[in-house]
Each structure stands twice: as structure tokens, then as C-alpha cells.
Image (cartoon, rainbow, N blue to C red):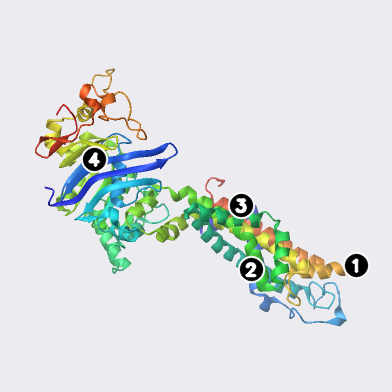
Amino acid sequence: MDILRRIWRSPSGRIGLIATLLVVIGGLAAPLIATHMPNQIDVAARLSPPSATHWLGTDHLGRDLFSRGLYGTRIAVGVALAVTATALFIGILLGVIAAYAPTPVERIILAVFDIISSYPSLILALALVAVLGPGLLNIIILVTIVFVPQFGRIARAQTLTIKERPFLEAERALGASGSRIMFHHVLPNIVGPIVVLASMNIPVVITLEAGLSFLGVGIRPPLASWGSMLFDGFTYLEQSVWPVLVAGGMLTLATLGFTLFGEALRDAIDPKLRREP
Amino acid sequence: MTEDALVEIRNLSIDFATGRGAVHALREVNLSVGRRRIVGLVGESGSGKSTLALALLGLLPENTSKVTGSIELEGKNLLALKPEQLEHLRGRRIAMIFQDPMTALNPVFTIGTQLVDAQRNRHPRLGRKELLKRAAAMLTRVGISDPKTRLSAYPHQLSGGMRQRVMIAMALLCEPDVLIADEPTTALDVTIEAQIVDLIKDIQAEFSGSIIFVSHSLGLISELCDEVAVMYAGKVVESGPTRSLFERPSHPYTQALLACEIDPDTEPGERLVTIKGGLPDLVDVPSGCIFAARCPARFDKCSQEPALREVAPGHNAACWLV
């Protein structure tokens, strides 16, 4: 709670927290708030501007943009959380193992990390789509692969800095086993910075997923995704700006919110960066 | 005395691999620790005291290249055990108190959690509540007031002396047969040091195991230990009952160490006594007596290596002058 209070104290943190809450609540409560079903077609009202029935207008098939945007939030935030959590888990596991494993194993793990991160993330994601094919689950899997190395590297570096600390030797002297040392004693000491990295990673995943969906290789229609909404809106841009504005606006709100929140979280957790009023 | 020894170290030699070649950290060390005894290990930095302590725990560093000889705990050779068996032994039969209590406790867990963890090996069947109760009792035992509150404190909330008491409590909760104390007071100030030494003495009185007390201070050793082994450059150069050793220090190195103890009568401005020179190169160990290069009483015979010879009952020194 102390951390929340500290986030609230900085203006950007406050904006980030509010935006993040709006996005998360909007996504969770989408079925309750949405005025229409996300895929419900109203051909008579194609590409209409905002009105009393369609609060933010409609797209080229007459689907309600407000409702589709809300359901898009679920996909965007859901994918981002799933990817970040999985990448976090696998990354920490590989990172800690790399720090403790014999040199050849460590080399292999680090080489894999290097190979993955030597490609620009969007290009690598596109290549992996070509192999795995599009679809919600595949997107989660391949974006996870893209993000594992950064968590793995941080986990390894953090582990190396505390690996030789006397308290770990003391634990061994008291009979703790190797795996107990790794996961019960090392892990709690390294999660802080990694969790901050994870929170800053969420907006990156959101934009990557939107980018893939925009290119037509991400979330499959008719499932609502901000990226595919942007693409459809782009196609009909001359007839109505509302689809692009709504999808783009929500995407901006979410990424901005999570970024500001992540930065405020980092400042709140790291005592060295804490600015006392 | 050898018959009822709890720990018997025979001809233990340990080498570490380095870029320059093998460092001979321990060379043919013999040491026996009787039941309910406090044995002191003295020597300057690099003399092999800590290596010996780590060897007892089976926690030698990864670059250990050669281990010969034996370490027997009640007749069982620890060097022949598998890693899992050693793991089983640590925290049950052998426990250790570390030098720096500031860094030897995990900063992210409460004292209570760490004290409970320490007992897991010893009492795998007891529940957390029971273990916490035992932890609280042990904290009282080692002189920490208000143990209930301390159990939920984090290490950084305690002073150095208290943390060392917690470390001691942790080691004692394992109810070990052998307790190794590796310079447990080095990081503490003098008044706390005295309290900790008193505590260890107290514990010894009701503790059924043996204590190996590693220190570079002969003063502490004389106060606390039943027997002393003086180490120099990986060898035991003199060993024996504390009384006999302090009355008749027979190896020139022991004598020099005693001369180096700071005398309160020293006048301001007067120079402190030091032993000139430094430890010999442990990669390329000079032949003959290892202390010869720094020894004031060196003579022709010192080019050959002296064996340990009896000075008094149970008191041996490795010097040609004995």
C-alpha cells in the first residue's frame, strides 16, 4: 500500500494509475458496459459518426466501435498479461539456471538469448507467425519467445550479483540443497527489478500484438483487436475517421497508462530513484 | 584421546587450481577434536583455517583440484560421502557460524522464517508453529530480549551483535555435533565480542557437541578453547592443550604471534611488534621449514622439513629447536 501511495504522489504516476485502471476495468467489465455485442452488424448504420445508439460511431460493417473497442481491450491486455507472465516465468527459470549451471550449459542458454534478441522483435514475430500460423494462442506463444531473453538476462545478472553473498553460503552450511538455494533464497532477492521490467514490458507487448493484427497475421477476425480495427479503419479512412480514432485512442491510452504506471512503479520501488517531496 | 575423538582429520591436503598452478592450501593437516571440547584454530589470513572449516562442511570451492587424507566424523570418512549425503549432514551434525553477521542472513526473509528454515533438516516433521516456538526459546537462550517481536523483524532491523546472536541461534537450533565458528567476532566491536565469547562459553557448558573456533586472535583462543592448533601456510605448526601451549609456546611462529598481541602497557609512539615478511608462495612451496624465511632462530637444519614432535603430553611443535 505504501508503494501505491508513492505512485499516487507523482503526477505522471497518477495519470498512469488512472489510465491503467480504466483499461483494466474496461476490459474486465466489457460485457457489462458494452452497449452492443462486439460482432453485431448494423448495415444500415455503416461508418456512422457518434450518436445516441452508437456512442463512438460504427465501422464499415456497422459494428459498434465503443463495444468493439472494449472487447479489444480484453484481447490486448489479456495477451499482454499472458505473454509477460509466461516470459517472466521462463526467463527467470532459464536465467537462474544459467547462473548456476556449468559453463557449457550457460553458454548455450546465452547463445539462444542472443539469437532471439538479435532480430528486431516485429520481424522475428512475423517469421514465427509464418511457422506457427496466426491465431490467439500462437500469438501468445511467439510473442513470449520474443520476450524471454530480456527477462532471462536480467535474472541471470541479478543472480550472479547475489550468488556469492555470504548468506547463501550460510544456508548451504545449514544444509539447504542446491535447488532450495536457487528458488527459495535467490529468487526472492532478484524479483524486484524483474517485476518492474515486466510492468514496463506490458505496453510493448500491446503494441506488438496490435502491430501483428494490423498486418493481418495476429488475432483473427471477427475477434476484436485494436490492430485489426485500425487496419479496417485505415481502409475506409476517407469515409469516416472514427474507427481509426477509437482504436488508436484506446491503444494510446493503454500503452501510455501502462508505461507511466511502470515508470512510477520503478521509482517507487527503487529507493535510489525516490524523490522525496 | 584419539579413541573418543568426534572429528579426526588425518593427513588432509587440499589443492586449488589457479592460473599459476596448484595452490597448496592445506598440507598434511592432522587434527583431532574430542567430544565436548572447544578447539581453537589460529593463524594469519591465508594460513588455511577457513579452508579447513569449509572442508569439514564439504563446501570446498569449485576450483578444488586435489583432496587427499581423511576427515572422519565418528569414524565415518566425510570425504568419501556423496553430495546428497553431505547435504544431509550439514545442518544436522555439522553447522557453522559465519564471520560477518551483516551479510550472512538473507535480507528478504524475517528472522523467524530463517530460524524455522534452519530447523527443517533437523525436524522435518514439526510444523511451523512448533518450530517458531523453539526458535523463540532459542533466541531467549542466546540473550535476545523480546523474542516474539524479533521473530518478525528483518535482518536490517537488528544490530550487528544481535544478528550474530541470531546466527548462533540458527546454528544451535540444528543441534549439531560439531559447531564451526569462523571468526564469529571479527566483524563486531570489542564489547559485543566479549558478550559473544561469554555466550559461546555458556553454550559449551550445556552443549553436547564440540566447537571448532577459528580466529586470528590468540587472546580470544586462550580465553575460550581447551586445545589450540596454530596454522601457518597450510600446515599445523604447533598444537596442544591451551594451557601448555601458552605456557611453553615452542614454535617460533607461535612465539611471534604471542609477541604480536597488543600489550595495554605499550607507550604511545612505541612501535607494535610485527612478524617481518609475508606468507610463502603456496603455489611453489619452498622446501625445508616453511617458516624459515621469517624465523629469527633459523639455522642450517631448517633447510629440511621438521616433523611434529612432542613438547609436553599432547603438545606438539614442528621445529628443529624443540
| Residue that mark 4 sits on | B41
| Residue that mark 1 sits on | A238
Residue contact at pointers 2 and 3, CB within 8 angstroms: no
Residue A10 bears which disc, if any?
Answer: 3
What's the residue type where badge 4 is placed?
Leu
What's the residue type where badge 2 is placed?
Ile
Q: Is residue B152 above or below residue B101?
A: below
| Residue that mark 2 sits on | A141
Label 4 neighbour load within 10 Å: few <14, some 14-19, many 20+: many
Chain to which mark 1 belongs: A
Relative horizontal placement of residue B28, taking residue B104 as reference (left or right): left
Task: State which mark lies toward you, 1 or 3.
Answer: 1
Q: Residue furthest left?
A: B313
Res B264 visible: no
Q: Residue at x 67, y 53 (%)?
A: A118
User: x, y (%) of residue A63?
Assistant: 80, 78
Near-viewer residue (A87 or A48) = A87
- Which of the 4 image quadrants contains residue B134? bottom left
Q: Residue at x 37, y 59 (%)?
A: A177
Mark 2 and mark 3 on one chain: yes
What distance separates the C-alpha of mark 2 from that of mark 4? 58 Å
Q: Which is nearer the N-term, disc 1 or disc 3?
A: 3
Label 1 neighbour load within 10 Å: few <14, some 14-19, many 20+: few
Near-viewer residue (B303 or A112) = B303
What's the residue type where badge 1 is placed?
Glu
- Which of the 4 image quadrants contains residue A136? bottom right
